[in-house]
């Protein structure tokens, strides 16, 4: 007989994190309101952007073209990457508009431009999405992208109607541990597996955790890449490493972690990110989810310093724990 029991992370009201994941403490709504008020007041202050943090768009496009079709990645900012693996081009969580908000003109605003504007992106085979938050699933970006190209869109459970409403025709929803093999007529192929993450979802005040969140394994060309989306650190990372690792490269969030009492249940800090990489058995790490928008209270340019210090202490060399410039391209080793 086939079991009809729901997976553990499915609930009657939506979804929940894997067992053993960190949880926000009960009664945290008062500290959360105070944090949101402090953040609102801070958003009017300019951010001092470090020299060389962002390449101009022409340099970014030239860097991507200079790889001449070889496998590599280009950081577009925040968690948006162009990733070419096994000759297949993947675009991850592209927030390329000005505001991470349902209202363009209000809310968290990026303080640097994207590495490549949505209208200048090269052709994409697969659009890979991790969850519903506005800094990962951006309506204005996705509507413009759907008007230019029709990639295969892979997303967590529950997001299909929204994405079809943006204009995408080839949308597939996936649960944790489900896999999808893409085979193109010219022989290029890649395997995508939706994996757990420790986070949450919402786009309104009434749909909290109604859609799933995930991380991804991308296998092609003899390589295995992990894209973390948004995640905190917990025991499930060791499970992922044991079941799906080792990984040649892990793209892991290192920013948006203060105050820790509120953020530890949804975002890794730089030290957590290195522990995630170790649990995943990742040979190399790229730090993401920093240097683009003020979402929390740490200094915007603190994450890469702490990340590289922690990575060095864990045995990762300078070419194994990477901090990229926005718009920079690098070949996959």
Image: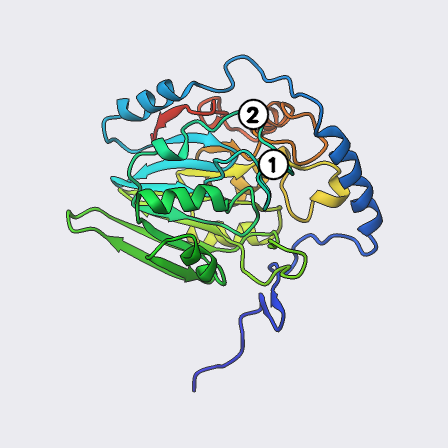
At 32% from the left and 26% from the top, the residue drawn is 64
Q: Earlier in the sequence, mark 1 or mark 2?
A: 1
Task: Please name which of the two marks, 1 or 2, marks the residue nearer to the observer.
Answer: 1
The N terminus appears in which quarter of the rendering?
bottom left
The quadrant holding residue 124 is: top left
At 46% from the left and 63% from the top, the residue drawn is 175
Residue at mark 1 to residue at mark 2: CA–CA distance: 40 Å
Query: Foreground residue, 88 or 332?
Result: 88
Dot 1: within a 10 Å radius of its alpha carbon, few (fewer than 14), some, or many (20 or more) residues? few
At 58% from the left and 65% from the top, the residue drawn is 9
The residue tagged 1 is 105
Query: Foreground residue, 212 or 134?
Result: 134
The quadrant holding residue 51 is: top right
Is 181 left, or right, of 94 in this rendering? left
Is 305 left, or right, of 97 in this rendering? right
Does residue 246 appear in this view? Answer: no
The residue tagged 2 is 312
């Amino acid at each position: 007989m086939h079991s009809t029991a729901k997976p553990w992370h499915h609930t009657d009201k939506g979804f929940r994190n894997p067992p053993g994941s960190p949880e926000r403490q009960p009664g945290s709504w008062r500290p959360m309101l105070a944090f949101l008020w402090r953040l609102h007041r801070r958003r009017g202050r300019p951010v001092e952007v470090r020299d060389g943090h962002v390449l101009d768009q022409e340099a970014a496009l030239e860097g991507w073209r200079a790889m001449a079709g070889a496998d590599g990645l280009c950081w577009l900012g925040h968690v948006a990457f162009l990733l070419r693996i096994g000759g297949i081009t993947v675009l991850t969580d592209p927030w390329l508009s000005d505001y991470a908000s349902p209202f363009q003109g209000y809310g968290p605003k990026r303080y640097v431009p994207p590495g490549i504007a949505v209208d200048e992106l090269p052709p994409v085979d697969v659009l890979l999405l991790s969850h519903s938050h506005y800094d990962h699933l951006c309506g204005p970006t996705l509507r413009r992208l759907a008007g230019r190209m029709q990639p295969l869109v892979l997303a967590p459970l529950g997001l299909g109607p929204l994405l079809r409403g943006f204009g995408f025709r080839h949308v597939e929803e996936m649960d944790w541990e489900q896999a999808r093999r893409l085979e193109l007529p010219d022989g290029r192929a890649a395997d995508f597996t939706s994996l757990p993450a420790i986070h949450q979802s919402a786009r309104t005040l009434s749909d909290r955790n109604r859609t799933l969140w995930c991380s991804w394994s991308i296998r092609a060309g003899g390589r295995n890449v992990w894209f973390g989306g948004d995640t905190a650190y917990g025991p499930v990372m060791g499970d992922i490493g044991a079941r799906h690792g080792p990984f040649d490269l892990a793209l892991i969030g290192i920013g948006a972690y203060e105050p820790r009492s509120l953020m530890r249940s949804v975002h890794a800090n730089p030290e957590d990110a290195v522990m995630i990489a170790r649990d995943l058995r990742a040979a190399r790490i790229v730090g993401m989810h920093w240097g683009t928008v003020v979402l929390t209270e740490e200094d915007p340019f603190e994450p890469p310093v702490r990340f590289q210090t922690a990575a060095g202490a864990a045995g990762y060399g300078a070419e194994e724990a990477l901090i990229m410039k926005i718009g920079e391209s690098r070949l996959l080793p």
